[in-house]
Amino acid sequence: MASNGDKVLYFMVGGFVGAAVALLFAPKSGEETRRYLEDRYREGSDKVADKVRSGREAVVDKAREGREYVSEVLQEGKGKIADQSRKVVDKSRQVVGSVTESVEKGKEVVARQKESISAAVEAGKQAYEAEKERLGEDEGDGTPDKSEA
C-alpha cells in the first residue's frame, strides 16, 4: 500500500501528464493556452496558499486549545491533590487524637489498678502483722506452738 507521500507524488505526476496531454490537444493557440495555464497556476497557487494558511491557523488553534485543556486538567488535578492532602491530614489528626485519648485512658486504668494492688498489698501486710501479733500472744498463754508439735 502506498504511503501518503507516494500518493501525493503520484497525484502531481498525473497532473503534469494531464497538463501535457491538454497542451497537445488544446484547440486554442499557444499564447491563449499559456495565458490559461498561467491563470490556472495562479488560482491553484492561491488555493494552495489559502489551504496552507488555514491549515497553519487550525494547527495553531488546536495547539492553543490543547495547552488550555492541559492547563485546566493540571489545575483540576492540583486541586484534587490538595483536597486529598487536607483529608489525609485531618484523618491523621483524628487518629493521633484517638490514640492519645486511648493512651491517657490506659494510664488512668493502670493508675487505678496500681492503687488497688497497693491497697491489697497493704491490707495483706496488715493482716500478716495482725496474725503475727495474734500468734505471738498465743505463745505467751501456754498453748503449744505448732512448730513444736
Image (spheres, helix red, strand yellow):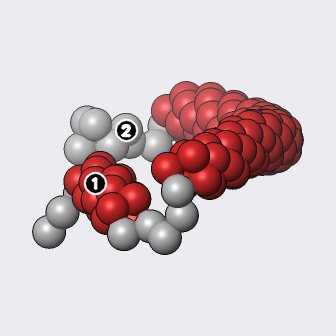
**Amino acid at circle 1:** Val
Give the residue furthest to the front.
Answer: 29
Q: Position of residue 142 (x, y in %)?
A: 48, 37
Q: Residue 119: x percent and y percent? A: 74, 37
Give the class, few, some or many, for how many residues have Cα within 10 Å of label 1's Cα (few <14, many ≥20): few
| Residue at the image position 33 percent from the left and 56 percent from the top | 20
Q: Determine which residue is flagged by label 2.
A: 145
Let me know if residue 94 appears in the view: no
129 left or right of 27 in image: right
- Which residue is pictured at 33% across the width and 43% down the height? 146
Q: Nearer the viewer, mark 2 or mark 1?
A: 1
How many discs mark residues in the rendered view? 2
Q: Position of residue 75 (x, y in %)?
A: 83, 38
Image point (28%, 54%), residue name: 13
Q: Which mark is residue 13?
A: 1
Q: Nearer the viewer, residue 106 or 86?
A: 86
Residue 105 horizontal/vertical position (percent)? 80, 43
Toward the left, the furthest residue is: 1
* Amino acid at dot 2: Asp
Is 11 in front, or is 102?
11
Quarter that holds the N terminus:
bottom left
Question: Which badge, 2 or 1, comes first in the chain's sequence?
Answer: 1
- Determine whether, in the image, residue 143 is placed left or right of residue 48: left
> Is residue 71 at all visible to an observer of this figure?
yes
In-image side of 136 versus 91 (left or right): left
Q: Quadrant of the C terminus?
A: top left
Q: Nearer the viewer, residue 67 or 94?
A: 67
> Please, what secondary structure does the residue beneath circle 2 have?
loop
Front residue of this view, candidates 138 and 81: 81
Query: Distance between the Cα atoms at labels 2 and 1?
Result: 136 Å
